Amino acid sequence: MLLRPAATLWPPVLLGSQFVFNIGFYAVVPFLAIFLRDDMLLSGGLIGLILGLRTFSQQGMFIVGGALSDRFGAKVVILSGCIVRVSGYLLLAFGESLSPIIVGACLTGIGGALFSPSIEALLAKAGTHSEAKGTRSRAEWFALFAVCGELGAVLGPVAGALLTGLGWMAQWPGAVATFAQPPLGLGLLGMLGCAWLLVRWPGGVRWLGLSLVLPLLLWQPQRPKPGEFSLLALDIGQGSSLLLQTAQHALLVDAGPRWASGDAGSQSIVPLLQALGVRLNRVLLTHADSDHTGGALSVLAAQPQADLLGSGIATLADQAQRPWQPCARGQQWAWDGVHFSVLWPAPATVKAANHKNTNAQSCVLLVRSAHGATALLAGDLERAQEHALLALHAGQTRALQAHALVVAHHGSQTSTSAPWLAAVQPQVALIQSGWRNRFGHPAAAVVQRLTAAQAHIFNTAQCGAIDWQSSRPDQAQCQRQRQPRYWQTLPHPTPTALATNTTGPE
């Protein structure tokens, strides 16, 4: 038999099981509440509703758990309850959106609904035997059982609250291991493997469950082939952050804005990098404006191995206690057959510029694949600097041409002049702007010029994250089209329609 009946039932073990089980159930409450508040940005009412659903899933389902215990036996249902609760904890650990968090919270409650009635049935049987022997009555055992359960319910939140203050231990070397977020199918197989390992199979069959768990831990997202690169324009509101990946390297250009409640680095960029299993080799901050550097400290803290390159970021580098190298025209490097060139700022022009205008010193990066596909990241470059770059490349008709253009300054009317577009000739234009932002980005005149240049326009305000691949230089893909949410009711628009902020899904 897979589950052998116990020769004797020892009541203290049952009491201890209830105690530990309740500590685990209630210790999660502080973590869950903090996560829903700080990471999911939910209101107090919604947090209370989710925690209430979790409690109801346990307390309100006891009758179901008791009926299943009568039907299939207490030990089978107890084991099932443990598996369901572990599955719920895994969803809480790996879930990045609200839906898996709610499902995980409910599963932790359902696991308790299966566990508690069954263990009480075993205690009743053990108490009857104890009473028959004249040692301790069944009522006394149930009283102790209630005390252990309530003690676990009291100590659980206390233990959870104390553990929340141990986040500093995550800075210890080797204290935290992160894995790329696998597809749902691999996640389900991993849960099945964990359940398999819990069952008492005959012989060594039990350890075959590891074969289902290991793919979950070893899975890695697909990276570009050698000589190619990918460009991901992150959806971080009114700001800029772009992730470039080659076959073995990764570059983050800018780190998004900072808000009163946090910053794009901690709330969006770092979780994304963890989900993708990305270790940054370099962080490039185009200039010191807060909508480009607001999340930089969080990113640098989470990616200590990355070197730092930027323009006018001395103060931020001091805060991060990181060495850095100024951005300067002529800087070049190559990763996996992909060539990176810094086109701006030029030292001579920076000295003559108004240093209060940080946009004038914005880094401009040209990335070229081994097969000639190019992307031009313009930072917050303005017209004067565009004209200066055009003058530097006078007579070099193809020097500034790019298949993909990250439009300067979020589509501001101060940038993206007609002569600049005539030189760049982009097939795809990527705009990072916030939904209904107060600046009116992108400006209608800029959209008109891009349209006249026959560029396909994509805007994160409608598109969500924008994925561009050097292997398909004339195309880009919207995250909201790839994985639409139920509240995004717009039909799939044309690329150019994604440029404006006049309509949207949210």
Image (cartoon, rainbow, N blue to C red):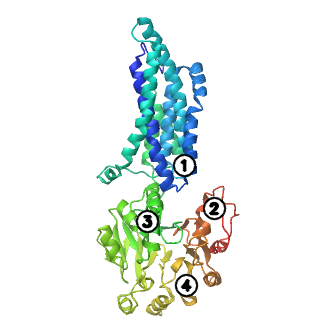
Residue at 51% from the left image edge and 82% from the top image edge = 401
Tell me which label, 1 or 3, sits earlier in the chain: 1
> Three-letter amino acid code at disc 4?
Thr
How packed mark 2 is, by other alpha carbons closer than 10 Å (few <14, some 14-19, many 20 or more), is some
Q: Nearer the viewer, residue 345 or 453?
A: 345
Viewer-nearest of labels 3 and 4?
Answer: 4
Provide the residue designation for mark 2.
481
> Three-letter amino acid code at disc 2?
Gln
Q: CA distance from mark 4 to mark 2?
A: 27 Å
Quarter assignment of residue 296: bottom left
Reply above or below: 38 against 8. Answer: below
Q: CA distance from mark 1 to mark 4?
A: 45 Å
Provide the residue designation for mark 3.
246
Tell me which label, 3 or 4, sits earlier in the chain: 3
Residue at 32% from the left image edge and 72% from the top image edge = 317
Res. 279 visible in picture: yes
Mark number, residue 47: 1
Quarter assignment of residue 419: bottom right
> Three-letter amino acid code at disc 3?
Thr
Determine the secondary structure under disc 1: helix
